[in-house]
Image (tube, grey):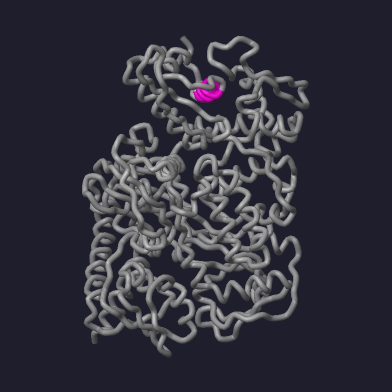
Amino acid sequence: MAKIPTTERLISLVVLLVETRKGLTKAQIFEKIETYRDANSPDAREKMFDRDKAVLRSVGIPLQLQENEAFGGGVESRYVIDQASFTLEELSFTQEEAAALAAVRDFWGGGDFSDAAKRALGRLDTAASQQVLTDQVAGTTFQFTDALTDEASFAEITEAISQRRSISFNYRAADGSAAERTIAPWALIQRSGAWYVTGHDHDRGERRNFKLTRILRNADHETSVREVDREYVGTEIPLAELAAGVAPVQRYPDITLFTPAAEQDHVLGRLFGEDVEPQGGKIVIHNPDEAVLWNLLTDHDLQIRFAPADHPVLDAFTERLQRLLTAQEDAVAKYTPHVDELTPLKAQRQRLSAADEMRLIFDIIAYTVANDGATHAELQQRFGLTPKALRTRLEKLPLYGLPQGGPDELFELNDDGQAISVSQVDAVAKPLSLAPVEAISTLLGLQSLAKLRRDIAPAAMGAYEKIRQALAARSLDRLAEFIWWDHSGVSAAASQLEAINQAIDTGRKIRLNYRTDTAGREVTPVQVRQFLADVYLLGWCHRADAPRVFKLSRCHRLELSDHGTLTDHQHQAVVEQDIFAAPAGSEQLTLFADYQIADHMPAMNPTHELALGEGDQLLRVPRVSDDFLTQSVLANAPKMLIIEPADLVAKVKQQINDRLELITDERA
């Protein structure tokens, strides 16, 4: 018997449970859907069904298990899908709100949030029955690149928090050991570019924080996060307090920082959330967080000195830096002989996952229904499909519908070769609601833009409230209660951002001093991008007469200058810059990395690999900016280390030695 594609099985499951208002028992589902019925074993059938439930949750279609009175007495469990809970009702946005949403589309400069926000925008546009969203020109001057783990894990955790359910997952600790952990999740916290889930650990009997990049995948490279039947242990701790306690938290006695006057505002911004007391040329931090001090110490752009010289954190940092230096030297000695064993990665055809394929089919149907038909050209443009890819989906569409259904129970497609219409699709005629990561990317983007751009804040929050209310059926309107996103990088550059936004809004240049440059230069600002705790200005440097990227922590005496405009060509050249790019002609590099780190690092596009076991690997990747690489090593070592080229290895070691020397000088 021919194997039924996963997408067809998933769509059959959705349509079956939507059409069967009272729901079905698990046994009835297995009987009606052929792939379940013909599974090789009961265990295989159960695992397949569990995977399908997880996929549906990840796209925002939760299966609910309800207890009902059985015929003849007793209670039976039935699975149901409430159509209202996974579809969007009609929405209406003002032109200003639509512009704010269009800005969110481009706010996320990369990563999973960027893709999710674009999907969400298209679906909101369909629900609004108006072309005001996708036709908008982006209005944002700020981009944030988010380092998110795989979407399925994020969706499972979000769903569990909103429904107050316990979960388990396979987790690799910082020492490399792996074990199953079972928790009652309370919140998702983003700190310095990394996402954490915090909650009650059932086995330890207390609160624990878990970094999402350390949640392991199973043998099929799917998320290991799954619901478990354990009592949910909640918390009354406020979200801000939960965020303050996320990884790693080690408090120390008061410490004093000495920093040049030009850097003090930036340093204060980096101390966002800490108890600080500026005193002229120094800053006293009360009860400082070790992680915050480490981030300041390892930023080689900052000229910071610590007091007192015998402060215990300096002992901890000395030991940590020495361990990193040893790990880097050992990795070069151990893995350099294996560099020649790296094998080219085969170019793989990009195939959509079953979840993405099902989401695409439903989006095509909803768009076509909302517009009373659609041309092939419209569908190709809206969903980014080639003519061949669209034709493949349209050919399959009449196969979907009720399992074992006759012609009247399958989707009907009318296609004249130029345009289509669909019928018998009532179960999925409305646009899908937003999946957890789509909702989060959209709502966080609107919140962040409201803080960054006062001119569009009312419209951004107006759109925020309308979307929040539309998500109430699935409790996703409560996202703000358990999602915390770190704005410390933005806060560090708040005064600079205000001047940059003013310059962009009024068409003016800015004058700035960069690094040790005392002559100054004029720049026409175009865009600001953030990655982790660093904020970058992209603009046209008039002194160089070329596009340039400026790290804001290196910019001093930033002030408004004369009016000036760019040509379309100059503007495009600026926005196409890559903040992670290495100088032209740079060779590739080889690094040692845990696969989860490599998977979620921007600009890591490996060309060769060598598996080392336990999830570790050697990767050869295009060389990116040295600043990005050295900061990545300091943040992730010993799970990310440079093996070659020698000049970059030397630079990483020099950065470590410079920090060690700084601490030593403090004690001289």
The image position of residue 346, as x and y in percent, is 46, 36
Residue 193 occupies quadrant: bottom left
Residue at the image position 65 percent from the left and 23 percent from the top: 425
Residue at the image position 29 percent from the left and 49 percent from the top: 200
Q: Which residues are magenta?
A: 10-18
The image position of residue 631, as x and y in percent, is 40, 64
Q: Answer left or right for 269 relative to 323.
A: right
Residue at the image position 40 percent from the left and 80 percent from the top: 303
Question: Camera-side residue: 133 or 174?
Answer: 133
Residue 584 occupies quadrant: bottom right
The image position of residue 355, as x and y in percent, is 51, 33
User: Would you say residue 15 sits in the magenta stretch?
Assistant: yes
Rendered position, 60 above or below 274: above
**Number of numbered labels in the structure image:** 0
Question: Camera-side residue: 191 or 585?
Answer: 191
Q: Is residue 150 visible?
A: no
Rendered position, 609 above or below 259: above
